[in-house]
Amino acid sequence: MSDRETFKHRFRPGVQETAYHWTNPDGSKGGIVAVTAKVSPSARIVNGAVVGPRSVVGKDAHIGPDVYIGEGARIGPGTFVGTGVYIEDGSQISGSVHIGNEAYIGEGVRIGYQARIGYHAHLGTGTRVGKGVYIGDDTSVEGGSVR
């Protein structure tokens, strides 16, 4: 960490912390990562993405452009997060999940292993998505569990 140039970044209103630009496994410049985040060296964070404070990004995860990962969120290994996805604080996304472009994942959402979240899907605060569940494109789920 000491060899990376750091700077102050405003993650959201009221949350400004020290951050750095991620370097992807292929050497390309990646997105902005809070210094308190834990990111696997094999993760790919595309330039334009933002990984918030105290978040975790697992092994071989792919974080697309214009993605925002909120404070304390966890992205499991092998998970693919498409373009323009917004993941709120404290959400927990298991391994091998696929999240389509422009999906919204609300605060405290839990998504099970190998689930698929469609394009423009909206998962409201506290929603629980079970292992292997498919949430279709343009679908909105407001809390509760989907198994």
Image (tube, rainbow, N blue to C red):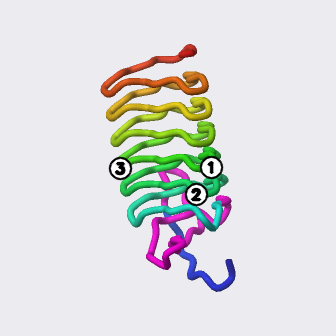
Residue 77 placement, left or right of 28: right
Q: Main secondary structure of the magenta part?
A: strand
Tell how many labels: 3
Write the start and end of the magenta stretch as one range: 10-38
> Which of the 4 image quarters holds residue 59?
bottom right
- In the rendered view, would you say 140 is above or below 103? above
- Residues at circles 1 and 2 in contact by the CB criterion of under 8 Å: yes
Q: Which mark is residue 77?
A: 1
Residue 124, magenta (yes or no): no
Residue 23, magenta (yes or no): yes
> Which of the 4 image quarters holds residue 135?
top left
Q: Residue at 38% across / 62% down in the picture? A: 48
Q: Which mark is residue 60?
A: 2
CA gap between label 1 and label 2 equals 6 Å
- In the rendered view, would you say 139 is above or below 54? above
Query: For the residue labelled by badge 1, is the local secondary structure a helix, a strand or a loop?
Result: loop
Q: Mark 2: which amino acid?
A: Asp
Query: How packed is label 3: few (under 14 Cα within 10 Å), some, or many (20 or more)?
Result: many
**Residue to which mark 3 is pinned:** 83
Q: Residue at 38% across / 20% down in the picture? A: 140
- In the rendered view, would you say 86 is above or below 137? below
Q: Residue at 45% across / 50% down in the picture? A: 68
Image coordinates for residue 109, horizontal then vertical, percent = 57, 30
Query: How packed is label 1: few (under 14 Cα within 10 Å), some, or many (20 or more)?
Result: many
Image coordinates for residue 105, horizontal then vertical, percent = 47, 34
Image coordinates for residue 19, horizontal then vertical, percent = 56, 68
